Image (spheres, rainbow, N blue to C red):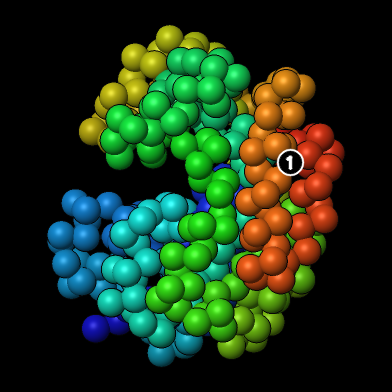
Amino acid sequence: MKLPTFLIAGAQKSGTTSMHLFLRAHSAVFIPQRPQELHFFDLDANYRRGLGWYAAHFVAAGPAHAALGQTSPLYIYSPQAPARIAAALPNVKLIFILRNPLTRAYSHYWHEFKKGYEPLPFPLAIEREPERLAQGPAARRHFSYVDRGRYAGQLARYRHYFSREQMLILLNENLRQDPVSTIDVCCSFLEIERQGAQIVARLGQSQFNQFRVPRSVSVQRLLAPYRWKLPRLIKLVDMLNFKTAAYPPMDAHSRQILSVLFAEENQRLAEMFNLDLTCWQDARAAEEANGAKNG
């Protein structure tokens, strides 16, 4: 049974898609083309399908593929995923890409807004997040803007099951500024040839999700309940209804609230994993660099 040797396990809106595309272009890496996110270890419905269903996505891997991978940004946030991964893949290597939690929260908000799930303005969505999360898994999936940015606690769950050597923690900001070096760090971690320069030369440096806004918000909200049920129709509507544009800068009050909320958590994260988070300290600069142009 062929199973992954590594997972790109999150965080959402932090560059997992970019790293997925970069590593998939490596000559020694096999990552299933579709679906991009298998959601095996985080979604109960998929997990109940069994390890055979999961392994079926990797049967096409050949002898030249020294590393088999899979991407699911929700793995880092899922409380049950670490234990499930450890039971099935005890020797797996885990890649986590973290983004300034302030800008990640804002990007996540606009992601939900454009898909029609989020009707509230950002300040109110932040204020009401605790009560919304108490509504259950669906609400946690869509409205966990602040909660997903508490990386230290999420990664601590993985440290309970995996050694530090099995975990590679990258910063989104470094991936954007120097994708070649960041890809090469991943290659070394996976013990495969460093091909960062070749991959970036072939794919270009613009493998990041460009933010799009709906021409009609009403259409998106009308179709939101059917996104999982009618994917082909939704994809067509999105193609017609979306346009590439920047979202507005975060309001100063929300920025201040989030800066205070994340300060202690970021310090804990830096100490736990010996990370240099200097690039997160100026929240305004980070937002302008990462948030307004890219989702």
Q: In this rendered view, identify the residue nearer to me: 150 or 137.
A: 150
Q: Is residue 16 above or below residue 57?
A: above
- Screen quadrant of the C terminus: top right
Q: Residue at x 76, y 36 (%)?
A: 287
Residue 36: in sight, yes or no? Answer: no
Amino acid, disc 1: Asn
Q: Residue at x 48, y 86 (%)?
A: 66
Give the labeled residue for mark 1. 290
Q: Quadrant of residue 256?
A: top right
Q: Is residue 237 above or below residue 10?
A: above
Q: In this rendered view, identify the residue nearer to me: 11 or 268.
A: 268
Q: Secondary structure at mark 1?
A: helix
Q: Is residue 120 above or below residue 257?
A: above
- Where is residue 120? Give x, y as percent: 49, 15
Q: Residue at x 70, y 63 (%)?
A: 270
- Where is residue 140? Give x, y as percent: 38, 38
Left or right of residue 83: residue 25: right
- Where is residue 78? Give x, y as percent: 38, 54
Left or right of residue 187: residue 142: left
- Where is residue 189? Give x, y as percent: 61, 81
Residue 223: in sight, yes or no? Answer: yes
